[in-house]
Amino acid sequence: MASILKVDALTGVTTAGSISVTGEGNSTTTNLQQGLAKSWINFNGTGTIATRDSFNLSSLSDIGTGEYSVTIASAMSNTNYAVIGAVGRNANDGSMFSNPVGTTANTTTTQRVKGLYADGGPIDMTQMCSSLLGDLA
C-alpha cells in the first residue's frame, strides 16, 4: 500500500536547509536543496518582450537585439551558479543560447542572456528559457 506524506515544511536534522535524498538502488545520496532550480524564466524575446512564466525573478529588460537582462528576486550566494538555457524560433536557423554575454558578467542578482545565430550574430527569439542552479544567499 502506498503512503501519502503531507507537510508544509521540511527541515534537515544536521543543517536546517539541507536534506539528503537516497538515489535509486541505494547507491548515492543527493542534496535536495542544491538539486533544485533557484530561478527560471520562459519569455518571448521578440517585439515587446513578455514573460510567459517565471520563478524567483523580479524583472526582464531588453538590452538590444537578442540580448536581455533578468533580475533575480532572491540573490544567489555567488556568481558561480550554473545556467541552463534554450532558445527557439519558427525557422530552423541554428540559433543558440549564450551566457554570460561578452564582457558583461552575471552578478548575484542579474543574469544576462543572448540569442545568437550559428555564426554568432545576435537575433531576437520567440522562445527564450533560462534556469539557474546553485545556492541562494
Image: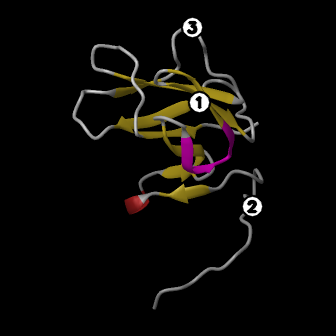
| N-terminal label among 2 and 1 | 2
Rounded to the nearest whole Å, what is the CA distance between mark 2 and mark 1? 23 Å
Quadrant for the N terminus, please.
bottom left
| N-terminal label among 3 and 1 | 1
Is 85 part of what is drawn in magenta?
no
Residue 86, how many percent across, how many down? Answer: 39, 37
- Report which residue position mark 3 lands on: 103
Residue at (61% x, 37% y) in the render: 134
Q: Residues within 10 Å of mark 3 (few under 14, many from 20)?
A: few
- Report which residue position mark 2 lands on: 11
Residue at (34% x, 14% y) in the render: 120
Q: Residues within 10 Å of mark 2 (few under 14, many from 20)?
A: few
Farthest left residue in view: 92
Farthest top residue in view: 103
Rounded to the nearest whole Å, what is the CA distance between mark 3 and mark 2? 40 Å
Identify which amino acid the numbered label 2 is placed on. Answer: Thr
What secondary structure is marked by label 1?
loop
- Report which residue position mark 1 lands on: 81
Is 58 part of what is drawn in magenta?
yes
108 shown above or below 27: above
| Closer to viewer: mark 3 or mark 2 | 3
Residue at (54% x, 37% y) in the render: 48
User: In the image, which residues are magenta?
Assistant: 50-59
> Quick check: 50 left or right of 79?
left
Identify which amino acid the numbered label 1 is placed on. Answer: Tyr
The rendered magenta stretch, by its main secondary structure, is classed as strand
Say which mark, if any, is on residue 3: none
Asked if marks 2 and 1 touch (Cβ < 8 Å), the reply is no
Rounded to the nearest whole Å, what is the CA distance between mark 3 and mark 1? 17 Å
| Closer to viewer: mark 3 or mark 1 | 3
